Image (cartoon, helix red, strand yellow):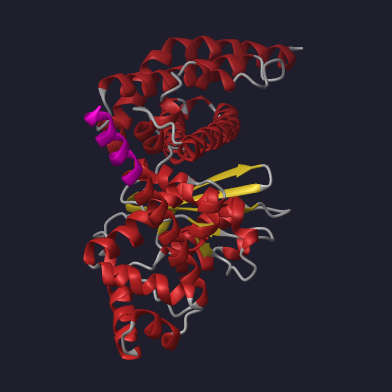
Amino acid sequence: MTDSTAAPLDKQTTLAWLRRISGDISTATLRRLEDSLPWYSEMPPARRSAVGLVAQTGITSFIEWYENPNETPTIAADIFAAAPRELLRSISLQQTLQLVRVSVEVTEEKVADRGEHLREAILLYSREVAFTAADVYARAAESRGLWDARLEALVVDTILTGEADDELPSRIAALGWHGHGEVSVLVGTTPSSFDVDLVRRRARKLGVDVLIGVQGSRLVLVLGRAEVPGQEPTPSSECMPFIEIATELENYFGPGHLVLGPTMTALVDASRSARAALAGFAVAASWRHAPRPVEADDLLPERALAGDVLAKQTLIERIYRPLEGHSTDLVTTLWSYLDNGRSLEATARELFVHPNTVRYRLKRVSDVIGWDATGPREAHILQTALILGSIGSSDVVRKRSSARRSERR
């Protein structure tokens, strides 16, 4: 009879003793944290106070658990409930486990002379706390992952629609975007099985950061030059061209066309690249031999025929106006050359010049605008630009004539 009542009496005595010294244990724990963990001493006072609250709650929770270990198996979860939400974002799981270890060490030292059963109870409870901490951080990471995915989808949608606002830079920063400088948008089809992490890892190896948007059957990647921490940004001359990066990422897209938008100087300007890529993706099937990937600017004629205003402006500004501003002979020669089926002799006869003169002028055309009229695909692009440019010029002439007639009246 004596032995059966001794254990409860000893436990009640131990509990009373633990409650009396709990304040001393908390104080000693905070002092040890200050001395042994540099990250704790460097924290702002408010965060340090929150960490101390976790430690104190853990000690109180242990006493309650020691009193009723079977009735309160999840009491360890209350330790982290007392901490503010931002604490999970300010200390890592590794730092939390360091906090648990220091708290256990101090508590063990304080109860070292109270018997082996109390020490075993501390070790068992510390294990429960460690597992609870891992669970808390896992759920927080899962929640953050879902939030990041929603935020990333919002940012990509904002870029695609061109409805950028003042909050776009802060949203991009919240996603941990490491890109700097040049940006381009890549549009293709979504594969049947798509692994986001594989794409991110491959993009990092290629020296770019990436924002990913899955919109049903359409997959959109916003590519930006990545800034490697601790290293100087790579000069533009040493960067892999975006078209080569798109080729490396081709296998992560589904079957069908893959269109790369023009390069922009900053992420906030990526909507222009996105518009071009989307317009090119919509008409890529009209070019029978379109490469994969293909640049959106190589689809300018098809985009213009489909009513893309940006493509029309690009053709006029990059082809027609530079030629017109340079020399009327270049425009006339190019018109004649294209109308005569790209025949040097027929063009020379029409213009009453030597074929070598036609050849020289065509070379000058290539030097001025960067397109070679002797190739079938580029000839198609140049002819579309001439047509659009002449329509625009005719509109200007008609408006000026109407204005003059109005003035006379």
* Above or below: residue 41 compared with residue 193: above
**Image quadrant in which the C terminus is located:** top left
* Above or below: residue 386 compared with residue 103: below
* Above or below: residue 236 compared with residue 82: below
Question: In the rendered structure, which segment of residues is drawn in magenta?
Answer: 397-409
Q: Is residue 398 magenta?
A: yes
Residue 197 in percent (x, y) is at 57, 52
- Magenta span main SS: helix
Question: In this view of the protein, which residue sits in the foreground, 344 or 120?
Answer: 344
Q: Quadrant of residue 37?
A: top left
Question: In this view of the protein, which residue sits in the foreground, 245 or 15?
Answer: 245
- Using the rendered image of the protein, determine whether residue 250 is visible from the camera's viewpoint: yes
User: Which residue is drawn at the image coordinates 43% and 47% (left, top)?
Assistant: 310
As drawn, the residue found furthest toward the right would be: 1
User: Which residue is drawn at the image coordinates 43% and 18% (left, top)?
Assistant: 84
Left or right: 64 with respect to 59? right
Residue 306 in percent (x, y) is at 57, 49
* Above or below: residue 123 compared with residue 62: below
Residue 248 in percent (x, y) is at 52, 68
Residue 161 in percent (x, y) is at 49, 36
**Image quadrant in which the N terminus is located:** top right
User: Which residue is drawn at the image coordinates 52% and 9% (left, top)?
Assistant: 16
User: Which residue is drawn at the image coordinates 33% and 23% (left, top)?
Assistant: 47
Question: In this view of the protein, which residue sits in the foreground, 50 or 317?
Answer: 317
Q: Quadrant of residue 131?
A: top right
